[in-house]
Every structure is written in structure tokens, then in C-alpha cells.
Image: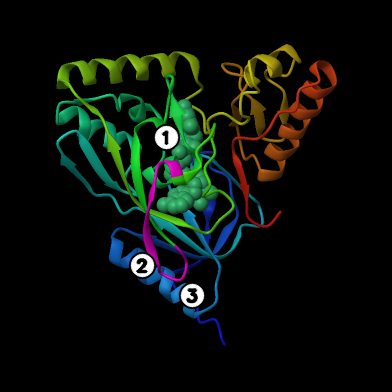
Amino acid sequence: MTKAPFGTLAEPLARHTSLHIGGPAEYYLRVTSERDLVETVRVAREKELPVFILGAGTNLLVADQGIKGVVLHNDWAETSVDGTIVTASSGTPTATVAAVAARSGIIGLEWMATVPGTVGGAVHGNAGAFGKETKDDLIDAELMDLDGRVWTATNAALGFAYRTSALQGTPTIVMRARFRGQPGDRDTAVRRIKEMANERLAKQPLAQPNTGSIFRNPPGDHAGRLIEAAGLKGATEGGAMVSMKHANFIVNIGDASAEDVRTLMRRCQSEVKSRFGVDLVPEVELVGEW
Ligand SMILES: Cc1cc2nc3c(=O)[nH]c(=O)nc-3n(C[C@H](O)[C@H](O)[C@H](O)COP(=O)(O)OP(=O)(O)OC[C@H]3O[C@@H](n4cnc5c(N)ncnc54)[C@H](O)[C@@H]3O)c2cc1C
């Protein structure tokens, strides 16, 4: 079968990741509706092309060689509210879920306001902040496989653990998710969101391109503390630097390549291992052609 191109060819993914790093997508399509998402998956299947779902690109280190096949950029954002339940399509920013909840007098979902990314990315990686994780508030998620089969998975069936879910390593696409909050008032929710945002701004290098925490926190400790104690705050590799503000952030201070970031990550891992005997496990996902 010939693979007639569709979407944009060789779109630089550096334009679509928060680190501003990443080589070309062989085929790139941005979708803004459920119909377009389903149709893109169908056409990719017909052309026998692999599909990579890109949310907001806030937890990714995309290889300099880019991603083969179709990169489906999910910008399909829709929400609805029923009582204290917010239903959101997978391309909805998590911050929008928090805002919609707050506007509707629902509390408990404020933490989602400060985690960048989409609902799909949050479910895939069990994103969390301020003592809460996706698994704490998610009721269920509608999923689709690359053959177009759709089903609903309960929270328990999603195999959530610290920054992981059973979806990782599978081509399953999150279509929608339902989150449950508690009855409350708008002012309380808005106040909490502001407090959380201020705390983040004080602690994280948000003015520089980054991808959030580079490593997961090892049990009972913090990756940032260990990297700092290993003397690596401010360490550089090409255009990549261990942030001076928070050592578990690698920032792009110039034209960092993915390889620069990977080399710096390896340096952090080997220093922390040799000094403290701790294995740092990446939280950021390395994707594409390494
Ligand atoms: C400044 C900053 C702060 C951050 N703080 C936090 C934090 O406090 N807590 C936290 O947990 N994370 C944090 N992160 C990381 C990031 O925000 C989360 O991992 C987020 O959930 C990623 O969502 P995304 O849409 O950007 O996913 P992407 O980075 O685009 O993709 C990540 C993975 O999810 C998959 N994916 C995306 N959408 C779908 C879908 N619809 N179906 C199936 N798979 C999908 C992708 O294929 C990929 O494997 C931070 C990042 C930044 C830049």
C-alpha cells in the first residue's frame, strides 16, 4: 500500500512542546473535534501509519530525529457539568476543568489549574499536584483503540499509581474523562487556585522553557534535593541547564537539542546514583527516533 501523505509534512515538534525541543513529525494533524480525531485515526489505520497522540506537549522530550508516522495533536476541548461532575474531552486543558468547576461552585479540582497539559495527558500519566492526583478525582474515562473501538474504563481499571497508569506503553487514546468534585462556592475555589499558582511561581522556573519535573521523586525523598546535593544546580550540557530555581527542572536556555537534555539527565542520574545510591526514574517521556 502506498502511504499518500496527509496533514502537514515534517512539522517541527519544537513548536508544540513546552521545552521548545523536538524534531519533525512525519505527518502532523491538529484536531479540534471528536469527529476529526476519530477520522484521523481511521485514515492512519488505512495507511498503516503509527499514531502518536500529542496533548499540550508538557511532559515530553521529543527526539531530534522527530517522530515517525502520524502525530495527532489533540486540541478537542469541550466540557459539561452535571451536579458536581465535570465531563471533559481529552484535549481540554486541565486548567479549564478547574476553571469550569470553580465557575460552577464545585470545589476539590483546584489543583488541576496549575498542572499544564490536557485531560488526556493527565489521565495517561496520573498527573497530580498539591497532594492530589488524577486518580483521586477521576470517575471514569472513555477510551478508544486504534481500530476505533470505544469503551469506558472505571478508575480502578486504569491501574493508576504515582505518575503512571495502565495506559502507558499502549496505543489507547483517552477520549473523555469524568471528574467528581464537591459542592462548594466559587470564591473558595478561585482563592485556592490563586494561592496554588503563586506558590508555583515562587518555586518553579516558569519563565524558561521546561517540561516540569524531569525525574519522579524516589520514595521518601525529592529528586530536586538529591540533584542539588550532588552539586548539579546550574550544570549545563549544550543549551540545557539544571534550573537554578528548582534542581528537578531542566530548562532550555538557548537552542538545546533533545540530545543535550538526555545527556544532562544521564549526568544527574549517574551522579545521584554514585553519591547516594538512588536510581532516578524519568518522569518526562522520551519519545520518537532516538
Ligand atoms: C511548568 C510545568 C509544571 C508541571 N507540573 C506538573 C505537576 O505538578 N504534576 C504533574 O503530574 N505534572 C506536571 N507537569 C507535567 C505535565 O504537565 C503533565 O505530565 C501533563 O499531564 C501532560 O499533559 P500533556 O497534555 O501536555 O501531555 P503530553 O506531554 O502531550 O503527552 C504526555 C503523554 O501523554 C500521552 N497522551 C496525551 N494525550 C493523550 C490522550 N488523549 N490519550 C492517550 N494518551 C495521551 C502522550 O501520548 C504522551 O505519551 C508539569 C509540566 C510543566 C511544563
Residue designated by label 1: 135
Q: Which mark is residue 45?
A: 3
Crowding at label 2, few (<14), some or many (≥20) Cα neighbours within 10 Å? some
Looking at the rendered structure, the kind of residue marked 1 is Lys
Q: Is residue 204 above or below residue 256?
A: above
Q: Secondary structure at mark 1?
A: helix
What residue did someone put label 2 on?
A: 38
Circles 3, 2 touching at the beta carbon (< 8 Å): no
Q: Amino acid at mark 2?
A: Val
Can residue 15 be seen here?
no
Can residue 6 be seen by looking at this rendering?
yes
Q: Is residue 33 magenta?
A: no
**Snapshot quadrant of residue 191:** top left
Mark 1 nearby-residue class (10 Å; few <14, some 14–19, many ≥20): many
Q: Which residues are magenta?
A: 145-156
Work out whether mark 3 precedes mark 1 in sequence or the reverse, and give the earlier one: 3
Which residue is situated farthest in the bottom direction here?
1
Indicate the quadrant containing the N terminus: top left, top right, bottom left or bottom right: bottom right
